[in-house]
Amino acid sequence: MSLNEFQRNQLIENREEAQTRLLRWFEQQARDLPWRHQRTPYRVWVAEVMLQQTQAETVVGYYERFLARFPSVEVLARSSLEDVLKAWEGLGYYSRARALHRAALQVIEDHKGELPSDPAALQSLPGIGPYTAGAIASIAFGIVVPAIDGNARRVMARILALPDPKQQELEEALRLWISETAPGAFNEALMELGATLCPPRSPRCLLCPWQAFCQARNQGEQETYPAPRQRKPIPHYDVAAAVIVARRCSQDSAQMLVAQRPTDAMLGGLWEFPGGKREEGESLPQALKRELQEEMGIEIHVGQLLIVIQHAYTHFRITLHAFICELESGEPRCLECQDFQWASQKEVDALPMAVTDRKIAQAIEGWLES
Ligand code: SF4
């Protein structure tokens, strides 16, 4: 799928004007974001990975803390995955952190510690797809290559009035428009335009540097492009988790059983209160007893409900029910987990956990105090 002759001619005709307007607008209006201060390859890389599926405002604090903790690719590669996951805690999509850590090791081993500039070589690293490779190559190394994220896709779909823009069409259009002297600034500016002036709803066209070239605006049909993707219904699951507390002489000495999820599973490497999904026909206590038997080979008594947490992941939603439980028989073993430990509250605080399990840990604190 490629552009038609009319579209190509329009792009060529407006190229210089489009570049000048966009770059000028970006110079004047760009948000002050920490990854724009120093554009070293490592810093650009960390920012681009964090910005995948996460808004800039959320990333800011994480980015600064992460770079203070892991200031270079060498430090990142030398650190444990658990430390990296801890620094990532709360940012979500933990596969990004695992891939970043694996990629750092690969950069040390295969590229003498230097991130490659070639987009194809960048894409051979874990967690770097065409968009991230384009962003790093253009912003950090000045390579003339497009970087097409969701924002760039939406803006270009509107500029060209494409209801269902294909990657090939977008790349062709952007290869015609991208600035050869400032490709990184051009890519950043385009994404900034999409994020600030041209969101999915209510674009602010009067402020847009590209309003004169925008076919969607000319038609008065901005929100029609690109056509919304058909979303599948999001399934919902009930999940139960066991809080098994042992040796409760005092609040400080209380220890609780936590398990580490297998590295290759969803939320891999993170620690959790063991449990799992309720199956059809099961009560929550029955599901919890079965899960603990399967996962750790122990029998438990399920006691009072501690907390109920609603959480939405990308492809499903859960209601998580955490129960106070007692160990009845058996010694915990890792049958379906990677590791386990009896941990004090302080030790639990130091472990990397998903946001749901962190909420359980906070609820335990209140329960132990009561
Ligand atoms: S003119 Fe409006 S719809 Fe077109 S790119 Fe600009 S903000 Fe988006």
Image (spheres, helix red, strand yellow):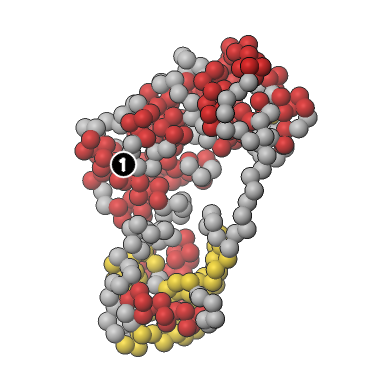
The residue carrying pointer 1 sits among few (fewer than 14), some (14 to 19) or many (20 or more) residues within 10 Å by Cα, namely many
State the residue in front, 198 or 24.
198
Tally the numbered discs: 1
When asked about the image quadrant of residue 354, the answer is bottom left
- Of 198 and 177, nearer the camera is 177
165 lies left or right of 267: right
Whether residue 365 sits left or right of residue 22 in the image: it is left
Quadrant of the picture in which ligand 1 is shown: top right
Q: Position of residue 60 (x, y in %)?
A: 47, 42
**Secondary-structure class at tag 1:** helix
Front residue of this view, candidates 361 and 95: 95
Residue drawn 23% across and 46% down? 78
Q: Where 198 sits versus 302, above or below?
A: above
Q: Is mark 1 within 8 Å of ligand 1?
A: no
Task: Choose top left, top right, bottom left or bottom right for residue 252.
Answer: bottom left
Furthest-front residue in view?
1
Answer with left or right where residue 96 lies relative to residue 71. Answer: right
Query: Going 54% across and 81% down the picture, which residue do you hit?
Result: 281
Q: Is residue 7 above or below residue 62?
A: above
The residue shown at (30%, 52%) is 81
Q: On screen, 247 above or below 269? A: below
Find disc 1 in the rendering and name its residue.
Answer: 103
Which residue lies at the image location 54% right of the left edge and 66% below the top edge?
Answer: 318
Report x, y in % for residue 203.
70, 34
Quadrant of the rendering where the N terminus is positioned? top right
Q: Is residue 39 visible?
A: no
Q: Position of residue 198 (x, y in %)?
A: 65, 33
The picture places residue 147, in percent across and down from the top left corner, at 49, 29
Badge 1 amino acid: Ala
